[in-house]
Structure formats: structure tokens, C-alpha cells
Image: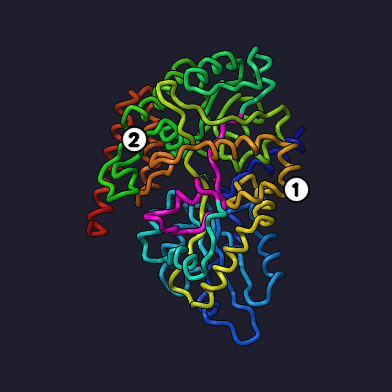
Amino acid sequence: MFGLMFALLFIISACNGEEAADEQNESSEGKTEENTAAPAGEKTKIEFWHAMSGPNQQAIDNIVADYNASQDKYEVEALFQGSYEESLTKLRSVGGTADAPAIMQVFEVGTKYMIDSGYIEPVQTFIDKDNYDIGQLEENILNYYSVDDQLYSMPFNSSTPVMLYNKDAFKAAGLDPENPPETFAEVKAAAEKLTNGDMKGFSILLYGWFFEEMLATQGGLYVDADNGRTGQVTEALFNGEEGRRVFEFLKEMNDAGTLGNFGSVWDDIRTAFVSGQVAMYLDSSAGISGLVESAPFEVGAAYIPYSEKAERNGVIIGGASLWMMNGISEEEQAGAWDFMKYLQTAPVQAKWHVTTGYFAINPAAYDEAIVKERWEQYPHFQVTVDQLQDTKPSTATQGALISVFPESREHIVTAIEELYQGGDPQAVLDKAAESTNRAIEIANKTSGK
Ligand SMILES: O=P(O)(O)OC[C@H](O)CO
């Protein structure tokens, strides 16, 4: 039993790249020397900072090894830098200098910060120079990282949220495991039936991402200026009716005792699901891989729920993308660009998708034999791709661009915690909006806008 739990915890902790720090790879020291052009005959080093640990780190290392063996000009060096938040903090201390890596992986909510940072060269520059055809890549993913038709960063590990559920628990509760609930009302009703003994019906991680997604799928905007896509953001809009519906949905289940709260650590909510403490919850599509293989019951995957008072609009792209730094040599930039293009090829994307659960940015990868085999074995992957491809492009599903997004996420988490302690949905959301507005105002003043 202990062995099984240990194996479960290992697999679960490995699903996402954010949690565990790998000290071995974690160093940016000695970088200055590496930034100079390589002597004739030697490969140019391309430093690649990322936030993937466990099997996802292994997947990156394998791809990097294949790339390095495939050509003799560049040597990519993949270096783990901690969680998405930690790695961005590290970048802040070296961004724009010769100590910066050539390629930096940044989570989606860091996009506006990176665009404004002065550290980067938009990948559009290289696309244009090289006549690179981005028409082959997934439009709904490119949309997130595009502003005024310019692609700023190269999508890499793209995910969306998905609702995972325990099919065995569904059967035991008299629910149809092949017809998971779709709307907030249906989830609430199913949660009542599923709540039993130690098992709660539904849960979400205390993480702003899931609120952002349930807001967007109703067509709700996070901020003004068309979610920051057409102008300068001045205020939060997430406390409008779509946001309130999400908070009411959570509150009603919390009051009814059908909602579980397993905190803000991915491993904890995944362990709760696998050990039967919760029957339905929202996870990243990149978390599916480990869970379907390790859960001692049949796992179902479904689209995220939406309010019955709204249309379903789809999901915003999550995960992270790759940024080209601007303080490095042209030779390094050329190598970084070459590697980014290699990453987008169908065979590499196919391998990345089946080993990690992240989407293939190049949909041609879905025709590769290894993907077809994997989907046949685990149809959950197909659900996530369908949910992405069914998404209606709009400024809501394109996602918000705000420089203070990571901070705003914290305000949302505080609001959810206050809600769970009995707070009024509108009041706690308004407070989060006011705090976000203050952060936006300060950021706008600092940047002189
Ligand atoms: O855990 P990931 O990589 O799927 O990313 C989830 C969120 O989008 C991070 O902001």
C-alpha cells in the first residue's frame, strides 16, 4: 500500500512542471562567458530556461538531446529554474543583460509583462526574416500570444483546463459516466449525488486560472479595452455578472457541503481525487497523463462547466510559451530560432504531446501514429483537443493581457478564500477588482501610460 501511494505521489507530482525545484539544474552563474560567440568549429551554446520538472523535464531533455544530435552548429542547454513564478523572478534580475538565457519559458499570464519588459525580441521578427509559415500552427493557440497580428512568443507547452471525474463514483451514484454534467446547475446537482462519506462532489484548486477560464467560457472579460487586446487596460471587469455566477456556483456548493477545498497545491487536489476524496474537479490538460494511469478507478475527462445563463464559448490557452531574449548575440538568436522551429515540427510535437499531455502546437502532429495510438488508449486527450478546437475566437477566449496578472490572480484566490468563509460573492469579487485596479493604476503610472 505504501509503495502504491509513493508511486501515486511521484506520478502526480510529476504531472505539472511547476512544483518541485531541481537544484542540480538551477544555476545561471557563469553565463556571461557563454554569451560570447563560439570559436570556429565549436557549437554555439543556447541557454534555455524552463519551469518543467519530473517527466516533463525529462521530455524536454530528450527533445534537446535529439536536437543537439541532429545538427552541429548549436548546443541547446535546458536549465530548470523552479516554478513559473520563481523562474520569472529570476529572469527579472538578468533580463536585458548578457546573463539572460537565449530562450525563456514564461507562463501565459506573464505575456504582457514580457511584451513590455524590454528584454525580448518578438518572434515575429524571425518569422518575417525567415518567411516561416505559422499558418501550419494552431490558430487558437497563436491568438493568445499575438497582438496587432504580431506573434510575440512561440507557443510551447499549451494546456487548457478540463474537468476530470471519477466514472466509478458516477456509476455508484446512479449517474451516467458517459454523460458528465456540462452546466453549473448540472454540476451542482451531480455534486449532491456524488457527495458521500469522505467524498465531496466537486472542487477546484485555489488558483486564479480556473476562475479566469469559467469567466471566459461564458464570454466574460477579465479587464477593459477588450481584455487589454485593443488598448491600455484601466480596470478589472471580472466582477461583472459572469464572474459573479462563478462565485455563486462555488458558494452554493460550499454552503450545501458538496464542495471540497484542497488548497492551492496541485499535488494535494490530485491526491484527493485519486484517493476518492473528490469525484469531479478541474485540472490542467497537462495533468491528465499521470492521473489516468495511476487512479485506481476509471477517469473521465469533460469540458469545463459553464453557466446555463450563458453560451459556452470555450477555453483560453494556458501553459507557457518561449521568448527570445534581446540582450544576446545574433548567433545565439539564430540558434534559438532554429531550435524553436525544430520544436514545432510534427514528429517533435507528437512526441511532446503524448509524453506530457500538452497540446501539439502543430496540429499535423495529431496524424502521427504515436498520437493515434495514445488517443485510442486514452480518449481523454481527444476531449481536450476537441474543447480547444470548438472554442469560439473572441477577446474573452483570447484571454486578458495585463502586466499585473500574477498579482491579480492572488487577489482572486483571496476572494475565493473569503467566499468559502461565508463572504458574499459580489462583495468579495468587488474587493478583488478594487485591489487589481490599484495594481493596474500603479503599473500604468510607472510605465508612464
Ligand atoms: O500547469 P500548466 O502548465 O498547464 O499551466 C496552467 C496555467 O495556465 C499557468 O498559468
> Vertical placement of 303 versus 373: above or below?
above
Q: CA distance from mark 2 to mark 1?
A: 42 Å
The tag on residue 238 is 2
> In which quarter of the view is residue 15 placed?
top right
Residue 364: within the magenta?
no
Q: Nearer the viewer, residue 136 or 343?
A: 136
Q: Nearer the viewer, residue 447 or 330?
A: 330
| Colouring convention used in this rendered image of the protein | rainbow
User: What residue would you read off at disc 1?
Assistant: 369
Residue 305 at x, y percent in the picture: 50, 27
Tags 2 and 1 in contact by the CB under 8 Å rule?
no
Q: Nearer the viewer, residue 321 or 1?
A: 321
**Nearer the N terminus, badge 2 or badge 1?**
2
The amino acid type, in three-letter code, at marker 1 is Ala
- Residue at the image point whose x is 26% and y is 59% from the top: 447
Single out the mark in the foreground, 2 or 1: 1
- Badge 2 crowding class, 10 Å Cα cut-off, few under 14, some 14 to 19, many 20 or more, is many
